[in-house]
Image (cartoon, rainbow, N blue to C red):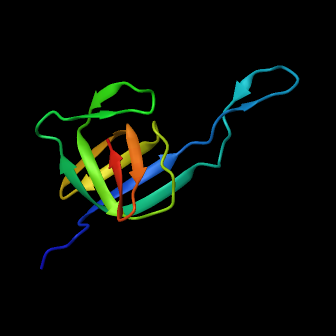
Amino acid sequence: MVEQYPDNIVITVHPDPVQDESTGEYSAVTGSDAVYTLSCRAEMNSYGNKVRGMDGAEYIYSHVVYLPQMDTVIPPDAEYVLTKGAMTFSGRVINASNGQLNSRIWL
């Protein structure tokens, strides 16, 4: 039997830094990272296709990850660990999209 989502991805979203009102310096918020563990199907980019990032630049992505449709917004630059069979990949998200039937993440 074919499994629709055989792979796993763990995405860690760090909150934006907070500015101190008295000094004006930014500091990281500790202990409030959002961690998502999701079943997915990851397909390798074997043709060198590109995706446009949120900054407008084009990037050659390594994988496109298909997930069931979700409402969670995955921001660019979130950290990921993708497990595909016996292989593990890690890095930062390039872009993500929540469509009508599924969600996609470009790594």
Residue 93 seen in this snapshot? no
Q: Quadrant of the C terminus?
A: top left
Judge left or right: residue 102 versus residue 31: left
Asked if 65 appears above or below 91 in the picture, the reply is below
- The spot of residue 31 in percent (x, y) is 65, 48
Q: Residue at x 56, y 53 (%)?
A: 34
Asked if 60 appears above or below 86 in the picture, the reply is above
Total number of numbered discs in the rendering: 0
Q: Residue at x 35, y 48 (%)?
A: 105
Q: Nearer the viewer, residue 93 or 29?
A: 93
Q: Residue at x 43, y 42 (%)?
A: 79
- The spot of residue 36 in percent (x, y) is 47, 58
Q: Which image quadrant is residue 102 in?
A: bottom left
Q: Which image quadrant is residue 29 in?
A: top right
Asked if 1 appears above or below 97 in the picture, the reply is below
Given the current orientation, which residue lies at the most extreme bottom position? 1
Judge left or right: residue 98 versus residue 21: left
Q: Which image quadrant is residue 61 in?
A: top left
Residue 46 seen in this snapshot? yes
- The spot of residue 86 in percent (x, y) is 18, 56
Q: Residue at x 44, y 33 (%)?
A: 54
